[in-house]
Image (cartoon, grey):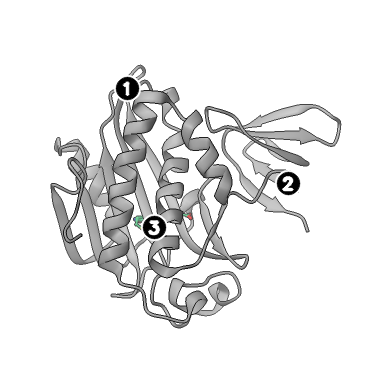
Amino acid sequence: RYGLGTKRLARNIHYRETIDSTQRLAHQLVQEGCPDGTLVIAEQQTGGRGRLRRSWYSPKYTGIWMSIVLRPDLPPQMAPPFTLIAAVAVAQAIEETAGIVPEIKWPNDLLIGGKKCAGILTELEADTDRIQAVITGIGINVNETDFPDPLKSIATSLSLASGKKVKRALLIQRILEKLEKYEEIYLQNGFAPLKILWESYANVAGKKITAHTLKGDISGSAVGITDDGVLQLEGEDGQMHAIYSADIEIER
Ligand code: BTN
């Protein structure tokens, strides 16, 4: 099959050769009233942003740097699963196009052989009771052959991992089609049916982890995620903790 098979996603596209951050432009477009499904995509970012105010290495032509604006009519409490839904869409699209199965590290990292190949940054514009927009930023290291120094030991690309060049256009198309389909499932049936799919790629259940949260560190054993996408952690004290947002360190 040729061409993009989406109905809503990427029917409005903002393509840039170079941009500071697709995420920044997507926020601006939301302010200007852009439609649901708007895609912002660039060949290179000079100020790519990661989670927790980290920067995101986004060299020219080799990777996928894009932000998708979704405008579901939902209350803000329903936003967290969007990160997980995007992670599943990206993981599956990688599996189909590069032939390797990435691991999802809750909530938003995709790893191959323990090294990061992709990250997802979900940001929300919302009133107290309604989501205005979910801005899903997706960064994938696709055909990079090398990384600059601090990244060398922690990052990989799909071509480094698979030994072949991966077609970015095909990967983008697959991601958008899956994201559209899974968002529809989520809107109709909630996160529970997607959780099974998410768990098939996830690597935390049963592992000893430390969650670095804004309120401090919690160590224990990861039990899994709830139907709302919240991480369940059984603390060393035997108490259950619900982790909404954290950086996870997996012990080996
Ligand atoms: C992370 O793992 O910390 C998330 C990384 C998200 C990077 C993408 S690249 C496209 C979009 N624009 C940005 O500035 N960041 C996201």
Density class for disc 3 (Cα within 10 Å; few <14, some 14-19, many ≥20) is: many
Q: How far apart are marks 1 and 3 (CA)?
A: 33 Å
Q: Residue at image x 72%, y 35%?
A: 233
Q: Which of marks 1 and 3 is in front?
A: 3
Q: Quadrant of residue 15?
A: bottom left
| Towards the viewer: 51 or 116 | 116
Q: What amino acid type should be assigned to the residue bearing mark 2? A: Thr
Residue assigned mark 3 = 93
Q: Which of marks 2 and 3 is in front?
A: 3
Indicate the secondary structure of the residue bearing disc 3: helix
Pinpoint residue 156: horizontal percent, then vertical percent: 51, 72
Q: Nearer the viewer, mark 1 or mark 2?
A: 2
N-terminal label among 2 and 3:
3
Q: In which quarter of the image is ligand 1?
A: bottom left
Residue assigned mark 2 = 210
Q: Distance between the residues labelled 2 and 3?
A: 29 Å
Indicate the secondary structure of the residue bearing disc 2: strand
Q: What amino acid type should be assigned to the residue bearing mark 3? A: Ala
Residue assigned mark 1 = 127
Q: In which quarter of the image is residue 48?
A: bottom left
| Towards the viewer: 208 or 34 | 208
Density class for disc 2 (Cα within 10 Å; few <14, some 14-19, many ≥20) is: many
Pinpoint residue 94: horizontal percent, then vertical percent: 42, 62
Q: Above or below — where is 108 with respect to 241?
A: below
